[in-house]
Image: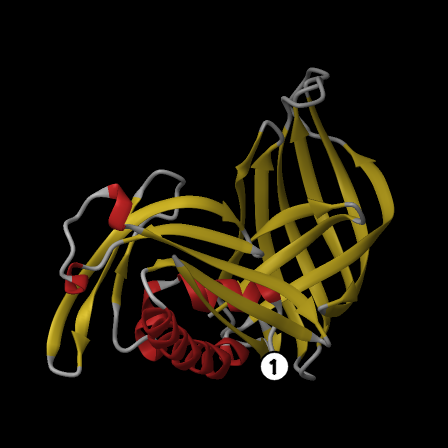
Amino acid sequence: MHEARADIHVDATPEAVWRALTEPELVRQYFFGTELSTDWQVGSPIRYRGEWQGTQYDAHGVVLEVTPPHLLVTDFFSPSSGLPDVPANHQTVTFEIVPEDRGSRVTVVQDGNRDEAGAQHATANWRMMLDGLASIAPTVDTVVARFDVDGWDPASLDGIDGGWLSAVVMRKTYTAGIVGTSVAHFISSGEEEGSRGYLAAERIEGVLDDGRAGAFTLHHGGLEVDGDSAFAHVVPGSGTGDFAGLTGTGRIEHDEAGPYFVLDFD
């Protein structure tokens, strides 16, 4: 078996590259018009449909591994190969995304090519795909917003008793992605670590890396026991200055440096 490999530097964050790689409406713009359908859950089917050089194609596979925004591995089979649709004729496609020089290095590897000519053909196709990805990803409005918590003031919840529910007024300084400050009204429930949840309304004022400045309100929350439950929504109509009309969604994530927001603005 022969391996096809291609890579490229993209002037966009790994989070923006991930969106360009996984959101069907973005994929369609640069990947030969491909209609992508999947829910990106491990074990779920994935399907690619479209037309290439006058010929219809309908390839499919299974999602094998998903680690946003750095690793995506899928099983892949194309009927155009002329081979029977059996496991031995499926290939594995791996995308790796790593930070590099204020952007990202994207590498794609496709194994299972039966000869060197097939591997070279696949490599050429992946290079065209990556060129398209590199043109789209910088236009994706994804912000990775890092912050420090500067204030944590307990607040009362009138009419609600019980140690299982508490409220604070939180003050933050945003240090990357957005540079500025915020005030959040934060309500948490649950007393045992690993089984807590929170809801918050946060007013953020600051400047993005591209110079846009203003303020907007973010509603966010999640369950500690389930990281996939994390959510954030820009409140429509809450933006001022350059953020007037701003909408979008996001989530809070954690790494060794602590919590941070990934915000996908529309």
**Point 31% across, 61% down: residue:** 114
Between 28 and 170, the residue placed more toward the observer is: 28
Can residue 257 be seen here? The reply is yes
The mark tally for this picture is: 1
Spot occupied by residue 47 in the image (x, y as percentages of width and height): 24, 55
133 vs 47, left or right, is right
Position of residue 266 relative to residue 173, above or below, is below
203 vs 230, left or right, is right
**Point 61% across, 80% down: residue:** 11
**Point 61% across, 71% down: residue:** 105
Spot occupied by residue 174 in the image (x, y as percentages of width and height): 78, 62
Q: Which residue is mark 1?
A: 242
Q: Which quarter of the image is occupied by the N terminus?
A: bottom left
Label 1: element kind:
loop
**Point 17% across, 48% down: residue:** 85
- Residue 181, picture quadrant: bottom right
Spot occupied by residue 251 in the image (x, y as percentages of width and height): 57, 50
- Residue 102, picture quadrant: bottom right
15 vs 49, left or right, is right
Can residue 236 be seen here? The reply is no
Q: Residues within 10 Å of mark 1 (few under 14, many from 20)?
A: some
264 vs 32, left or right, is right
Q: The residue under label 1 is which amino acid type?
A: Asp
